[in-house]
Image (cartoon, rainbow, N blue to C red):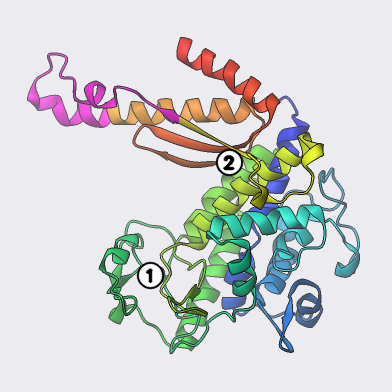
Amino acid sequence: MIKNDLLDASCRFALAAFLHDLGKFAERARLCTENKEGNLAVYCPVFDGRYSHVHAAFTGIAIDQIEPSLPDLIKGDMAPFSSWKMKDISKQDDSLINAAAMHHKPETALQRIVAIGDRLASGFERANFEEYNKAEEGGASPISHYQARVIPVFEGLCRSEKGWSAEYSYPLAPLSPEGMFPRLRKNNSPSKVEAQAEYAKLWGQFVEGLQKIPEAHPRSWPLWIDHFDTLMMTYTHAIPSATAGKRPGGGFVSIPADVSLYDHSKAVAALSVALWRYHAQEPESCQMDSDKGQAEFLLIQGDFSGIQSFILASAGETRKRAAKLLRGRSFMVSLLTEMAALKILEALSLPSLSQIINAAGKFMIVAPNTGEVIKQLSIVKNEIEQW
C-alpha cells in the first residue's frame, strides 16, 4: 500500500472530530475515573459558578480509556497534532485528545476548527451557539438526559405548536434487525437507574467491539477508520446527539431528539476535515471565521443517471425472474456509486467519513474548496465518465 501522508493526517483529524461527543456516551454510562475534576477544569467552560457541558470532560476520559485499542497516538506521526506523550493534560496543547475534548472551550486553531464543525453540524448561528453553550444538559425536564431516546424523524411531522407529540422512540441497543425499529415511547421509557445500566451495557459492548478490530489494521489509518465508522454506527445510532433544544419563546429546554450521536459526529468529522484542509492549503484565510462568507466547503454529488430505466428494464426476461433482476440491478447501482465515491475520496486524499450520503444511486462528499481539490476532481470525474 502506497503511504499517503495527507490522507493519514486527514484520517487523524477526522477521528478527533468524530470523537468530540464520545463523552456523552461515556458520561451516561457512568464511567468511573479518578481524573474527573482535572478534566472538568481543563475541558469545560464555567457559567454562573458551575461547569457546563460536562460531557466534554468525559470525552477526554473516554479517549484515554480506549487509547490502547486505537492506532498509535503516542509514539507515531501525529500530524497535524502534537505528540501525546505528556500525562499532564493541561500541557498537551494540540494533541488529538485535546482537539476532540476542547470543542466547548477551544484555545488553539485546531480546536477551533472542531468547535466550528460542531456548531455548523448542529445548525447553530454563532450567537445561538454561545447561548446553547451555557445550557445545562437535561434542562428543565421531567426526564433526564439518561432517559432521553432518539425519536423517528417522521415524528416531527406530528409536532404541534405546543411542543413535541412523539409517540415512538428507538431502543437503546446495538444496530440490528430488531433494534432498528422504533417502539412506543410508553414502553421505551426506563427509569434513570435503568437507563444508566442500559448505557453501561452498551459501552461495554462498544469497547469489546473496538478490541476485536484486527491488530494489523491500526497500521493503516484509512482502513482502521473505516472499521471504526461501522463500530460507531452500530453502537451510537440510537444515542441522542442533543437533549437541550431551543424553546420557541427563547431559552433552551430538554426535547426528544431526532438526530443520533452517530449522524451528528460523522457530520462534524466531514465538516472539520474539509475546514482544516481548506485553511491548511489556503493560509491567507487563516481566520477560520465561517461567518465571513468564505466558500470553504465543496459539496461533491454523484448521481447514477438513468437509474429507473436501468433497474426496471425487462431485457426480454420473464416475470418469473423479475424480482431477482430488480435486486441484482439495484445492488449493481449501489456497487457502482460506492466505487465512484471511493475513487473520488482516494483522489482527494479524504477519509471515508467525508462521505455523508450514499443511497438511491446518489452520494455526497464534503471536501475543501481548494484549487488542488478542484483540479483533482476534474481529472477523476473525466476518468469515471469515460469508463
Res. 315 visible in picture? yes
Magenta region includes residue 303: yes
**Which residues, given as a range, are shown in magenta?**
302-328
Magenta region includes residue 248: no
Residue 8 % position (x, y): 73, 38
Please state which amino acid type lies under the numbered disc 1.
Pro
Res. 215 visible in picture? no
Q: In this figure, which residue is indicated by the disc labeled 2?
A: 354
358 displayed left or right of 268 = left
Establish if 152 lies above or below 142: above
Q: Residues within 10 Å of mark 1 (few under 14, many from 20)?
A: many
Nearer to me, 113 or 318: 113
CA distance separating discs 2 and 1: 28 Å
The residue lying at 62 percent from left, 67 percent from top is 127
Establish if 212 lies above or below 92: above
Q: Label 1's element?
A: loop
Nearer to me, 232 or 113: 113
Establish if 322 lies above or below 295: above
Q: Pointer 2 and pointer 1: residues touching (CB < 8 Å)?
A: no
Q: In this figure, which residue is indicated by the disc labeled 1?
A: 171
Closer to the chain start, of discs 2 and 1, is: 1
The residue lying at 78 percent from left, 81 percent from top is 34
Residue 151 % position (x, y): 36, 68
